[in-house]
Image (cartoon, rainbow, N blue to C red):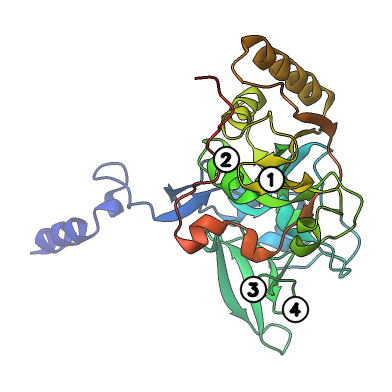
Amino acid sequence: MRYLRILAIFFLFPWLLGGVMGEPPKEKIKIFNARTKQIEEVEKVIKTNQEWEKILTPEQYHIMRLKGTEEPFKESCLLPPKGKGGIYQCAGCGADLFMYNAKFESQTGWPSFWEPVSQLNIRIETDNSLGSQRSEVLCARCDAHLGHVFDDGPLPTGKRYCINALALKLAETEEAAFAAGCFWGTEAVFNQVKGVINVSVGFMGGHTKNPSYEEVSTANTGHAETVRIEYDPGQVSYEKLLDIFWSIHNPTTPNRQGPDIGSQYRSIIFYYTPEQEKASLLSKKKLEKTGGFVGPIVTEIAPAQEFYKAEDYHQNYYQKHGIKPTCHIPSGLKK
């Protein structure tokens, strides 16, 4: 009878036999991969305190595993160099947490973000540790303490994810910027490209600071409707982005794309690095040699200036309205 009881226990809990009858099933969760823009099923990262102590610095261990808080203004959050973007990842497990362009200056002494890459990648729990109720932010994959979230952030979310700098590590990406007429359509095209992590629509190339869409529409600000692209060069090359840029608009019409007329619709490649400038000039020269267009190519190639993000209702415009993109059908090609 005793043996039957033992067999029953092992039948119900086979991992008690260790390697003989298998290990307990590992918990899996869904995580958003910011580079591929795909939701992936991954294993939870579970380690002992001793294992975490070997991986993390003493300061990181105090914050991420013991729910400590770094001193304000003491630690700096790494910033990507000019011409590059980045994804802030969990310093413990590498899960993608926040995009570089979601970061804002809150003057609180800690890195602040207005949204995570996905709600799948974080977990929110109630924290009553200081005698008042707060919302704790944890990494969904390894349960690391990251910081807290508050309702005093900027639009469009109104959230301020106040995160410990030591809980983050920066994975660099690269940036590109193009003006090719109506930025709604340009954004929609580049959003479909594998390796493109994020696309924002806005304004660049002019003299007016913090312009509104209405101001740019007057053609008096000098700005062009522009898309800023954050991409992974390991998945898509800058040359490929240039090929797409040339293919989605007519580069022979100055200050015009189809029915859209004005300097805000002019064709421009904004380069961030000398390498991008060289590649842009070469691609334009090759296109001119092919003679594929009726008229001369008038596309400007200029150094990137400050990018002013357009109002939220312009971001992902077609997706928000369920409209199929129709802006970009080049009309200047030779028949």
Q: Earlier in the sequence, mark 4 or mark 3?
A: 3
Marks 4 and 1, Cα distance to the nearest angstrom? 28 Å
Residue position for label 1: 227
Residue position for label 4: 152
Residue drawn at the location 91% of the way across and 60% of the way down: 74
Residue mark closest to the camera, 2 vs 3 = 2
Residue position for label 2: 190
Q: Earlier in the sequence, mark 1 or mark 3?
A: 3
Residue type at numbered disc 2:
Phe
Of residues 69 and 148, the one nearer the viewer is 148
Residue contact between numbered discs 2 and 3, judged by CB atoms under 8 Å: no
Residue position for label 3: 136
User: What percent of the width, then of the height, locates residue 203?
Assistant: 77, 51
Residue 335 seen from this side: yes
Of residues 235 and 333, the one nearer the viewer is 333
Marks 4 and 3, Cα distance to the nearest angstrom? 15 Å
Residue 234 seen from this side: no
Q: Is residue 173 left or right of residue 110?
A: left
Q: Residue reaching furthest left?
A: 1
Q: Is residue 243 left or right of residue 78?
A: left
Residue type at numbered disc 1:
Val
Residue type at numbered disc 3:
Glu
User: What percent of the width, then of the height, locates residue 201?
Assistant: 68, 51
